């Protein structure tokens, strides 16, 4: 081996160096959203330096400067570590190392390191997003990364060829990867890992009138639902996320009592659990990451149906459900609800107090009106109906851009501006009910959803965010009242806030397909993409050990480890055999054997006729010998040998080869006849 | 501790090497031509290959801890690529036919090349050839058809060497594997002493000319020109009469008087310096010089005497005698 000799200095071809730089830029650009501005600046500087070094090879950064840069960068990351959290700090460090390594490619080891770092960063991208779109980009960039690696061993004129070769390698490997994905046993997490802490999206923990307006303009996906039972009516799809029963005069939020989730309260729930009656709704929810803990469900959830899920879900006394950890990646869970079940036939004192509380002196006009309503309508349901009538008959408007409110906001809204959206109406309604002595609370969640026929699922977007009220009536329990229905029945009945569409206020980018919903073909395309993305989320992202167990028992009868070993081994062998066969077909050059075989047939006939070709004699010379001996076949034999020689020794294109071969074949037929006559 | 361990380690590795070579001898016996196939190709993950597999496991752990199916899919894809690459690296060597020149010769401290013929059925990439402990030849690609490569041997001292098996290896396609084979052609490498010129003063001292005049009947010196004959292809170029050629008299060869004589004797005892190696190096220089001049000479190495003669065969015989002179 060459260990005694100084090996050649490591260098990448120019083309490959540029490919590496491009690959670095592409991979880092996927992480732009996660990196802080100063880190991005450093990374861009490093990449520019790398580019400059490629343009001017004489330029070389001294090691000391690189070392200094590395140290100061690490120091800066360590300083801002508390702000970033563990995961982001690690990511910053990796990205920094990845861009810096490009400046110092002195040995093959450095090159290998940069390739593996690149792949690791691609994996890191997948921690933050697992959508079909991002995943396909990651696979493409993975192939680009392999291209750079392959380019070191496979030097071609154009990088395109190398890229195709790398892509072919990836494609060849996909079947086995899929088999492994399906059958390889899934393990539970070994240890706690820092999860992605992105900005929380969707509903927030507290609601102030004016809050949901921003959400209503976002066409981002919140979650998807697949019903195993019949799809309920649109106006029954009130996806409850949070119950807000504490009001401080301005903001609604969850009281500590209702949000608590210690074991004591849990046992209480199971004790107080009402008898589940009425029609059953079974559905699977695939939630997009919100980086928050609350989950969506229809009331009332059967707590027993939550046990089978991949994540641990807690059912709260206010009939909402909550994950034990923030949802940081697409997560699916299965829920069964009984929508007609009565909730809380009795309230304890503490609950009653919480749900009646309004700060003293807050919104005095509404408080006064509440008092008069109480006197006017002793029956609770009639009282609620009366408030809805006020909203319906007076000049209230539903709009996403209501005028600014200040001071006693609810008074101002109810008596002066009269313009608002769901949160305003739900707040006012709840406030009035409390003022009139009826326990009431605000519920935040989503309403409805877009039905996708192709894959039979509902997609709920952020603009479906909604707030409504619940009142407690003796012997009936909590009842849902949606004051928005009084002002904008369309929103409740068919979804798609048409008033929003008139506002046309999606504040997303121009490329957003939601913007062009009115174009039929765009909408079809959008629904198709949605369906594809849904299948991806359901089958790939949602593939859990339970799903694996079900699938494998369905296919192979039972779930035995030896069967899995056989499947993996078998598919490995199959892949190898297929590659072997493909390679065999490539190396055995059939035509060579073909024309040689033809020629040898003729030689065999000539041998019988008494003329043998010496091994060393060239075909052209032999044709002269044949011409002398058998003048009758002279012309055809000379032409025949010429064809043979062309095929044998000249490098012909495929087309020429086929042409010459067919010519040779015809001459052979003719020749054979002539030889028979001799 | 280290001093205690290292001899054990060394002897262990020697033992395994020996066992391995014995096994290799049975597995791949010497032949003049080898066709690479699953019988003689070995595949081992390279260091990078091991690093890659460790990385795949790391990625799998990451995916499991995050319960992230896409990262898991990526780790499976990488594992699968590992297998694909293994097959590719095998296909890259398999089917190549290699034959090598059995013998090569040259001077010590110079590069000696073995001619290796590679017949590849289609395009192959990143091939390395080397003999044990010798510098490797790297072909970044080898196109379809026959190709000749020159594999280098370099020896510090004269002698006859057996460079051992020719190692052929490749790291195609992703550097994850080293695919290699060690094939035996029974190569033999004759290494002549280094050429060490004699200075003019030393030459007189050696008494070389004296010997000449004693042996030759003719009193004429080496440079004495005798006649011009028509050039016979194969005759040394140094003897072409360039002047006559320039005048347009055709290609003629100068013949000197000494050639008719019995030639001179080159004696080891006549060489200056005490060291035998240096004496041999001087002799090697003289043998070369006499050969280029086309002069007959004999070689006297004490026990081994080669009668004066000339020509390529004689020249080789003399050099060989110098190479194998007992140390």
Image (cartoon, grey):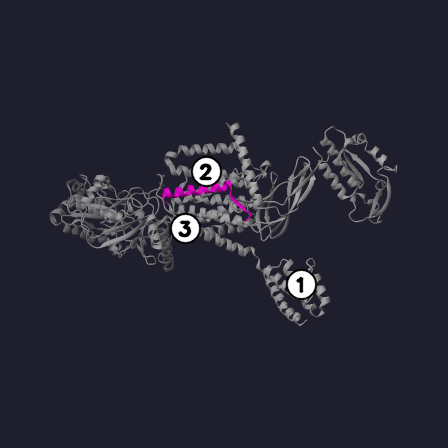
Tag 1 residue = A642
Q: Is the magenta stretch mostly helix, strand or loop?
A: helix
- Of mark 2 and mark 3, the one earlier in the sequence is 2
Q: Mark 2 lies on which chain?
A: A
Tag nearer the camera, 2 or 3:
3
Q: Which of marks 2 and 1 is in front?
A: 1
Name the quadrant of the C terminus of chain B: top right
Local packing at callout 2 (Cα closer than 10 Å; few below 14, some 14-19, many 20+) is many
Q: Is residue B12 magenta?
A: no
Q: To which residue does mark 3 refer?
A: A566
Q: Residues within 10 Å of mark 1 (few under 14, many from 20)?
A: some
The Cα–Cα distance between marks 1 and 3, rounded to whole angstroms, is: 56 Å
Residue furthest to the bottom: A677
Please name the residue shown 77% across and 47% down the image: B234
Q: Can residue A47 be seen in this view?
A: no
Snapshot quadrant of residue B67: top left
Can residue A584 be seen here? The reply is: yes
- Could you tell whether A629 is left or right of B131 in the image? right
Contact (Cβ within 8 Å) of mark 1 with mark 3:
no
C-alpha distance separating marks 2 and 1: 66 Å
**How many numbered discs?**
3
Q: Is residue B300 above or below residue B174?
A: above
Same chain, labels 2 and 1? yes
Q: Give the range drawn in magenta.
A: B39-67
Residue A96 bears which disc, if any?
2
- What x and y, as percent, mark residue A402? 28, 48
Report the chain holding disc 3: A
């Amino acid at each position: 081996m060459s260990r005694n000799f100084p090996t050649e200095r490591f260098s990448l071809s120019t083309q490959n160096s540029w490919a590496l730089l491009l690959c670095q830029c592409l991979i880092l650009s996927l992480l732009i959203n996660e990196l802080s501005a100063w880190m991005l600046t450093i990374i861009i500087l490093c990449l520019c330096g790398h580019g400059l070094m490629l343009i001017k090879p004489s330029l070389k950064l001294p090691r000391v400067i690189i070392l200094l840069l590395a140290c100061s960068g690490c120091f800066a990351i360590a300083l801002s570590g508390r702000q970033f959290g563990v995961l982001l700090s690690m990511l910053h460090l990796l990205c920094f190392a990845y861009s810096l390594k490009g400046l110092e490619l002195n040995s093959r080891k450095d090159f290998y390191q940069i390739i593996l770092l690149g792949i690791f960063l691609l994996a890191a991208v997948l921690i933050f997003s697992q959508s079909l779109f991002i995943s396909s980009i990651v696979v493409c960039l993975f192939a680009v990364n392999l291209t750079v690696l392959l380019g070191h061993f496979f030097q071609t004129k154009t990088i395109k060829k190398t890229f195709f070769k790398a892509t072919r390698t990836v494609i060849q490997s996909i079947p086995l990867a899929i088999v492994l994905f399906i059958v390889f046993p899934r393990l539970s997490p070994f240890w706690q890992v820092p999860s992605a802490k992105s900005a929380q999206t969707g509903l927030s923990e507290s609601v102030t009138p004016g809050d949901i307006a921003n959400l209503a303009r976002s066409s981002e996906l919140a979650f998807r639902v697949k019903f195993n039972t019949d799809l309920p009516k649109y106006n029954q799809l009130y996806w409850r996320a949070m119950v807000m029963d504490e009001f401080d005069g301005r903001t609604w939020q969850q009281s500590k009592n209702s949000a608590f989730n210690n074991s004591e309260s849990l046992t209480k729930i199971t004790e107080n659990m009402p008898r589940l009656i009425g029609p059953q709704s079974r559905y699977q929810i695939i939630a997009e990451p919100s980086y928050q803990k609350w989950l969506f469900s229809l009331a009332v959830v059967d707590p027993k149906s939550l046990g089978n899920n991949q994540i641990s879900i807690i059912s709260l006394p206010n009939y909402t459900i909550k994950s034990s950890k923030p949802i940081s990646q697409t997560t699916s869970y299965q829920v069964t609800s009984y929508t007609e079940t009565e909730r809380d036939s009795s309230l304890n004192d503490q609950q009653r107090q919480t749900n009646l509380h309004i700060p003293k002196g807050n919104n005095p006009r509404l408080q006064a009106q509440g008092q008069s309503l109480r006197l006017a309508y002793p029956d609770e349901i009639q009282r609620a109906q009366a408030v809805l009538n006020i909203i319906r008959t007076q000049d209230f408007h539903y709009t996403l851009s209501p005028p600014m409110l200040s001071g006693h906001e609810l008074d101002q809204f109810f008596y002066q501006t009269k313009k608002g959206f769901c949160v305003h109406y739900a707040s006012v309604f709840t406030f009035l009910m409390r003022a009139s002595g009826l326990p009431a609370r605000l519920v935040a969640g989503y309403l409805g959803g877009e039905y996708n026929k192709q894959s039979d699922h509902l997609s709920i977007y952020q603009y479906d965010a909604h707030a409504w009220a619940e009142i407690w009536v003796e012997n009936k329990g909590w009842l849902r009242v949606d004051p928005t229905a009084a002002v904008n029945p369309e929103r409740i009945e068919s979804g798609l806030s048409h008033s929003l569409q008139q506002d046309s206020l999606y504040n997303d980018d121009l490329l957003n397909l939601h913007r062009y919903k009115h174009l039929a073909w765009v909408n079809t395309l959008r629904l198709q993409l949605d369906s594809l993305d849904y299948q991806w989320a359901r089958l790939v992202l949602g593939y859990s050990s339970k799903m694996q167990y079900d699938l494998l028992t369905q296919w192979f009868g039972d779930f035995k480890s030896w069967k899995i070993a056989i499947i993996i081994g078998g598919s490995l062998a199959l892949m190898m055999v297929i590659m072997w066969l493909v390679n065999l077909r490539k190396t055995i050059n059939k035509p060579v054997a073909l024309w040689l075989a033809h020629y040898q047939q003729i030689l065999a006939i000539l041998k019988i006729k008494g003329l043998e070709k010496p091994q060393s004699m060239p075909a052209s010379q032999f044709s002269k010998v044949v011409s002398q001996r058998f003048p009758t076949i002279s012309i055809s034999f000379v032409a025949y040998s010429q064809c043979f020689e062309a095929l044998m020794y000249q490098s012909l294109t495929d087309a020429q080869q086929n042409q010459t071969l067919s010519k040779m074949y015809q001459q052979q037929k003719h020749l054979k006849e002539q030889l028979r006559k001799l | 501790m280290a001093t205690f361990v290292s001899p054990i380690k060394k002897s262990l590795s020697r033992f395994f090497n020996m066992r391995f070579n014995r096994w290799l001898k049975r597995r791949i016996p010497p032949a003049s031509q080898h066709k690479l196939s699953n019988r003689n190709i070995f595949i081992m993950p390279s260091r990078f290959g091991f690093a890659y597999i460790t990385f795949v496991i790391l990625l799998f752990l990451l995916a499991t801890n995050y319960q992230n199916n896409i990262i898991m899919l990526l780790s499976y894809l990488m594992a699968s690529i590992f297998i694909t690459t293994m097959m590719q690296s095998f296909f890259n060597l398999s089917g190549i036919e290699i034959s090598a020149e059995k013998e090569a010769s040259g001077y010590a401290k110079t590069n000696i090349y073995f001619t290796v013929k590679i017949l590849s059925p289609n395009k192959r990439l990143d091939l390395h050839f080397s003999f044990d402990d010798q510098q490797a030849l790297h072909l970044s690609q080898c196109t379809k058809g026959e190709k000749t490569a020159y594999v280098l041997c370099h020896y510090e001292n004269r002698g006859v060497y057996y460079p051992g098996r020719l190692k052929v290896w490749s790291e195609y396609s992703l550097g994850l594997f080293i695919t290699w084979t060690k094939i035996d052609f029974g190569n033999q490498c004759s290494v002549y002493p280094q050429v060490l010129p004699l200075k003019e003063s030393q030459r007189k001292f050696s008494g070389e000319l004296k010997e000449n005049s004693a042996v030759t009947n003719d009193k004429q010196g080496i440079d004495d020109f005798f006649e011009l004959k028509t050039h016979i292809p194969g005759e040394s170029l140094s003897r072409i009469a360039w002047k006559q050629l320039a005048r347009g008299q055709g290609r003629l060869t100068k013949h000197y008087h000494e050639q008719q004589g019995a030639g001179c004797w080159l004696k080891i005892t006549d060489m200056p310096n005490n060291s035998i190696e240096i004496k041999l190096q001087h002799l090697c220089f003289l043998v070369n010089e006499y050969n280029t001049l086309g002069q007959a000479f004999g070689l006297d190495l004490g026990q081994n005497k080669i009668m004066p003669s000339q020509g390529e065969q004689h020249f080789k015989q003399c050099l060989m005698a110098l190479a194998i002179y007992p140390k």
